[in-house]
Amino acid sequence: MKKALVISGGGSKGAFAGGAAEYLIKEAKIDYDIFVGTSTGSLMIPLLALGETERLKEAYTSTIQSDIFSSCPFIVDKVDGVVVDTHINHMRVAWNFIKGKKTFGESKSLRKHITKFFTEAEFKRLKATHEKVIVTVSNLTRNVVEYKYAKDYNYEDFCDWIWLSCNFVPFMSLVEKNGFEYADGGFGNLIPIQEAIDAGATEIDVIVLNPRLQITNKAKSTNAFNLLTNAIDFMINQIAQDDIYLGLLESRHSNIKTRFFHTPKLLTENSFVFEPEEMKEWWEQGYNFVKSRLPK
C-alpha cells in the first residue's frame, strides 16, 4: 500500500494546508510515500516530505508581499493593519508594459525565497529518501500539463519547477525554460489527484484550499482588470471541480481510498495577498480542522 498527500493550489491559503498537513504527519503519524502539489502545494511538499513542518510553518507565517513579488501589480488597502480591499496598481502595470514586460507583475523574489527555506542540503536529503515528490506545471507552448519528479533533476532545476508551478500569469512572471513558456500548474490541474494515482498511490489524502460548496456573489466588474480576475477565478473554480470529479471517478474505479479536506469556509477572495498574522490564523485553523475530522 502506498499513501499519497495531494495539495491544491491556493496562494497564501497554503497556510491552511500547512496546518492540516502538520496534523496528518506529526499527530496522526501518517507516513506518506507520494507528495503531489500544484502552485502553493508545490512549495510545501518538499519540506513536508522531509518532515520539516516547523520550517514550513516559519516560511508560511512570515512571508510578505515583497518575498513574492519583485514587481507587485496589486495595491493592498488596510485599516488598522487589516486588509479591507485589493485592486490593480494601474501605474505599475503600465510601467511594466512600457518596459516590454509580458505580464502585469513579476515574481522573481519568490524564486530567491524558495532557496531560503529549501536549501541544497535539504534537496540532497530529499533525493536520498524513498518518497516521490512531484510538482505540477503548465507548458503553455505545448499546451500540456507536466509533472516534475524531484529525483529527476538537480537542485537549481527543481527549484525552477517549484517556482514555475506557482507563477499565476498574467499577475506573475511568465518564464521560458528549455525553450518552452511555463506558468502555474493550476491552469491545467489544480488538484492533481490523477498524478498521485499514476504514481502508484492506493490511499490518498487531498487538501483542497476552497470550501466543498462555494457560492459567492461577486460585485459587478468595474474595469477590464477586475473583469479579468473574476473570469480567471471562475475558470480556476471550474478546473478544481473537474479535477475532483475525475479523481473520484478514477479512485472508485481503481478501488483507491480517497479522503478530502476542504477549507470549512472561504478564507480570502485574493490569495495573492500575503499577511503573516492572517496566515498564522489559517495555519491553526487547518491543524484544528483536520484534528476535528479524524477519528480519535
Image (cartoon, helix red, strand yellow):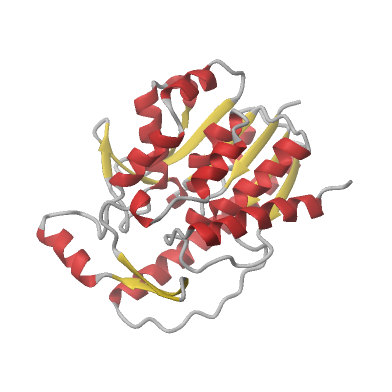
Quarter of the image where one finds residue 31? top right
Please state the total of marks drawn on the protein image: 0
Q: Is residue 285 above or below residue 167?
A: below
Quarter of the image where one finds residue 204? top right
Q: Position of residue 52 (x, y in %)?
A: 59, 33
Question: Does residue 250 appear in this view?
Answer: no
Quadrant in the picture for the N terminus? top right
**Which residue is rendered at x = 61% and y = 59% of the image?**
281
**Which residue is rendered at x = 29% and y = 49% of the image?**
173
- The residue lying toward the viewer, choosing from 276 and 100, is 276
Indicate left or right for 186 with 195 as reference. Answer: left
**Which residue is rendered at x = 48% and y = 41% of the image?**
43
- The residue lying toward the viewer, choosing from 60 and 131, is 60
Question: Does residue 22 appear in this view?
Answer: yes
Indicate left or right for 172 with 53 as reference. Answer: left
Q: Position of residue 156 (x, y in %)?
A: 35, 26
Q: Position of residue 7 (x, y in %)?
A: 59, 45
Q: Position of residue 220 (x, y in %)?
A: 42, 84
Instruction: Residue at the far front: name it.
Output: 80
Indicate left or right for 138 with 151 as reference. Answer: left
Instruction: Residue at the far right: name it.
Output: 296
